[in-house]
Image (cartoon, rainbow, N blue to C red):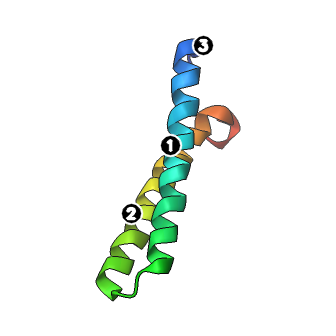
Amino acid sequence: MTQLSNRELMSLEENVKLEMNMVRFAQSCSHLLTDPQLRAMCQQISQDHNQDYQSLARYFNPRNL
């Protein structure tokens, strides 16, 4: 695997944090909503961002590739 520059690593770290924030936000929204369609949509958004988080986080633990 190619070694990342400091700038790339910082950008990756920021994106990992943003993805986790989106996961938490969407989960929070799904818990607050009473409309089943909106709740399901927020749960799907949370799952999608969690997958993105997992994909990005692998760069910090290359053994999972």
As displayed, is residue 62 above or below residue 30? above
Q: In this view, does 21 lie to the left or right of 64?
A: left
Q: In this view, does 18 lie to the left or right of 37?
A: right
Q: How many C-alpha atoms fall within 10 Å of the one at disc 3: few (<14), some, or many (≥20)?
A: few
Name, please, the residue furthest toward the front. 32
Residue type pointed to by label 3: Asn
Q: In which quarter of the image is the C terminus?
A: top right
Foreground of the two, 44 or 17: 17
Q: Where is residue 14 in the image (x, y as percent from the top left)?
A: 54, 32
Measuring 33% from the left and 72% from the top, which residue is drawn there? 41
Residue 18: mark in rendering: 1
Residue type pointed to by label 2: Ile
Q: In this view, does 40 lie to the left or right of 63?
A: left
As displayed, is residue 53 above or below residue 35? above
Determine whether label 2 and label 3 are within 8 Å by CB.
Answer: no
Viewer-side label of 1, 2: 1
Q: How far apart are marks 1 and 3 (CA)?
A: 18 Å
Residue wearing tag 2: 45
Q: Which comes before the other along the chain, label 1 or label 2?
A: 1
